[in-house]
Amino acid sequence: MTLEKMTKKELIGLVQSLQAQRPENDVRRIKGASEEDLYKILAHSSQVGFYIMQDGRFQFINSHFREYGGYTEDELLQMSPTSIIVPEDRRKTAKNAVMMLKEQRFSPYEFRIATKDGRIKWIMETVMSITYKGKRAILGNSMDVTERKEAGRRLEELEALESSILDAIPQAVVGLHERRINFANHAAKLVFGWHREEMTGKSIKMIYRNEEEADKIGALFYSTLEHQRTYETEFPCLRKDGREIICRMKASRIGEKLRERRIVVTYEDITAEKKAQEELERSRQELRNLSAHLQFVREEESTRVARKIHDELGQSLTALQMDLSWLANRLPANSKTIREKIGGMTDIVDATVESVHSITTELRPSLLDDLGLPSAIEWQAADFQKRSGIRCQAQIACTGELIERDLATAVFRIFQETLTNIARHAKATQCRVTLSENEKEISLEVTDNGVGIMQWQVDDPRSFGMIGMRERAHLWGGTVHVRNVKPSGTAVRVIIPLTQRR
Ligand SMILES: Nc1ncnc2c1ncn2[C@@H]1O[C@H](COP(=O)(O)OP(=O)(O)OP(=O)(O)O)[C@@H](O)[C@H]1O
Ligand SMILES: [Mg+2]
């Protein structure tokens, strides 16, 4: 029932019921009130904006309506009602109001007003025809819906932002509910070749190579996401064009629990990356094999040369030594000059024997072959101390029985490199060598009390000494760890497992 059609009695009833909710209003004022008074009472008791308009002017405005625009009652009574509406909304609002007055429209309409201090507010309004002071007038009911509109707008913005973020992501993002695709972003087309519309509503099986794999990955996702928020893995997928790709997948459940079985999965095509990685790994392996081979060839060559020098030069020198002493013994007693000459020659031959020995030892320490790694290390430590003046203490807790020849060579060469480094870089006065073994591994640790080392020096791709040590150890499945020690100095630790063989 419209207000216009209410009897005076019904209006009073309505006003009284409204006033019952607002006890501060004086009920007695209603008794004997005029129609105008009744509208006013009704309007003031209403929780919404309320106005009466007649002959293109406000005749009456309630306090709520005044609050919307921040105008005073006098100001509103003076101004044209349409002037508070923002210009762009005026025509449409007038049209809506006319339709509603003609009862061609029944739902409220919305428009914007400019407040006195220049802000924009959204108003929702209904109008109806009434009789006021015996003439036709318009009764307007309005509400400030700015907050609701703003919230709606923010939500829209958020949704727009969300979808633009989704579309900006280069990976395919797919929303799943019970393994059915809810949504997919633009990049899904790039990754899988399917348009998002082709994917929505379908089973996620469409992007896997076969049913079993689809079931397997599905079971994996759903079971892990029961107790963790996200899960990452790599898995083969199938594109629309039939090409197989490897995807890095990150799945996360929507919400705190997986109860609704809703998850989001991102798929990143890493086929090229994988291929490059494999390629890199393969070429690294080739380089390692080459370096191992070169080392092997070098060791073999050194051994061969050392043996040849030892056998041929050594024998000749020994023969010379014997001949010289034979000569010396047969010289007449008065041939002093010749005797001195022979003494000099003997000295030269002895020195040559000495250098031949040191050259062959450097090429291939015979100790390594004759007495094994522990003795060779001990001898090398003592020799180092003698040559460098750096005190070098060796602690050997290893029989060397489990160590085969090539492994012994590798450890010995690593040891030689650590000693060379100490002599060249450490500025140390002491060093300590520990060689130990158990049934699982052999361990060599060389510690000096020098200036210490920086991590970048260890990792520098130009540190060929370091690389060589690591490569030799790597060949035997072992590791080299270089660190600083307190109060100062460097420790190099080599660990080689004894179970692993090339
Ligand atoms: N015991 C050490 N104390 C201090 N610095 C060291 C020690 N060992 C190595 N370094 C530092 O690490 C760097 C890398 O060592 P690395 O053995 O790889 O190269 P290098 O000895 O300079 O050259 P080379 O290739 O002839 O061995 C050295 O240049 C040196 O600065
Ligand atoms: Mg070096």
Image: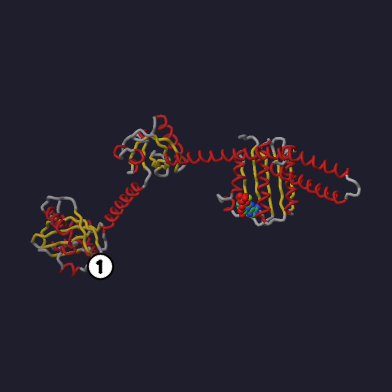
Question: On the image, which quarter does residue 136 sit in?
Answer: bottom left
Instruction: Determine whether the residue tagged by mark 1 lies in a helix, strand or loop.
Output: loop
Q: How is the image coloured?
A: secondary structure
Q: Residue at x 76, y 40 (%)?
A: 314
Q: Is residue 38 visible?
A: no
Number of numbered discs: 1
**Observer-nearest residue: 290 or 328?**
328
Check the image and report above or below for 441 versus 148.
Answer: above
In the picture provided, is 496 more to the left or to the right than 184? right
**Observer-nearest residue: 167 or 81?**
167
Q: Position of residue 329 (x, y in %)?
A: 88, 43
Question: What is the quadrant of the C terminus in the image?
Answer: top right
Q: Position of residue 358 (x, y in %)?
A: 73, 45
In the picture provided, is 444 more to the left or to the right than 282? right
Q: Is residue 442 visible?
A: yes
Three-letter residue code for mark 1: Asp
**Observer-nearest residue: 10 or 312?**
312
In the picture provided, is 84 more to the left or to the right than 271? left
Q: Position of residue 302 (x, y in %)?
A: 67, 40
Q: Position of residue 443 (x, y in %)?
A: 67, 42
Q: For mark 1, what is the residue?
A: 117
